[in-house]
Image: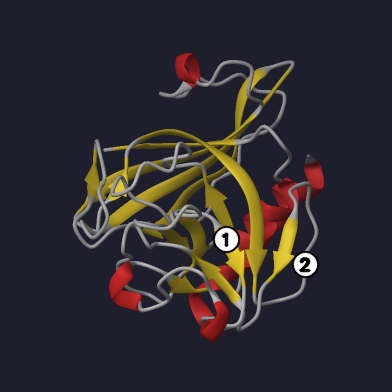
Amino acid sequence: MRRLLVLLCAAVLALMCAPAAVAVNAPWFARAVGSATQVISVVGVGGSKAKMDVWQRGSAGWQPIGIGIPANIGANGMAAKTHDGNMATPMGIFTLDFAFGTAPNPGGGLQYIQVGPDHWWDGDMKSPTYNTMQVCKKAQCPFDTDPASGTENLQIPQYKHAVVMGVNKARVPGNGGAFFVHTTDGGPTAGCVAIEDATLVQIMRWLRPGALIAVAK
């Protein structure tokens, strides 16, 4: 934990870190995350901006690993329920299922997939693989690859590194998909959470299976 504290403190300007032995008040999400020991908290601060705090639970209770990390969220802020095209970040508690990126695996406890031009996130609401990652040549994909369909090609700068949020895991058509924590381009997102790449890499190296993300206004 000490190494992670140093790494995150170095990566984030004005980051505040708490000593591991000092007890702190339970974070706002504490009663909603079950036995999880790693939680990324994202709280809206107005418009398309949010504050990210990174928490770990140990023998002394919940401890902040990194606090006040600036984040960009959906262009339309946050929403209790999201739908395809509404440009809002979903509120709730979600799993962090696996990681991917155009860059090589930076390390960490989550499965990582290095993506290229044949990697897609299927946003075609008529497709049986809606809201999943797929690999295929564009001309051979069995789903609509037109961006107007909601499908994304994953070889873009914003996906230098990304962690998949478990939103709409039932894959109900129209209830939204392709929600990630990813590298920021400095502007609002279509519903994802975006932070500086160097900080994201440090968080990814810390993440382990069972980690959650908690999103609220």
At x 54% / y 70%, what residue is drawn?
Answer: 120
Q: How many angstroms separate mark 1 from mark 2 (CA)? A: 17 Å
Q: Quadrant of the N terminus?
A: top right
x and y percent of residue 30 in the render? 49, 19
> Who is closer to the viewer here, 211 or 138?
138
Residue 31, above or below 13: above
x and y percent of residue 47 in the render? 19, 56
Tell me the number on the disc at residue 150: none
In the figure, is residue 137 to the left or right of 124?
A: right
Q: Which residue is mark 1?
A: 133
Helix, strand or loop at mark 2 = loop
Colour option used: secondary structure
**Which quadrant of the structure image shows residue 199?**
bottom right
Q: Residues within 10 Å of mark 2 (few under 14, many from 20)?
A: some
**Which quadrant of the structure image shows residue 28?**
top left
> Who is closer to the viewer here, 82 or 123?
123
x and y percent of residue 152 in the render? 44, 72
At x 74% / y 48%, what residue is drawn?
Answer: 110
Helix, strand or loop at mark 1 = strand
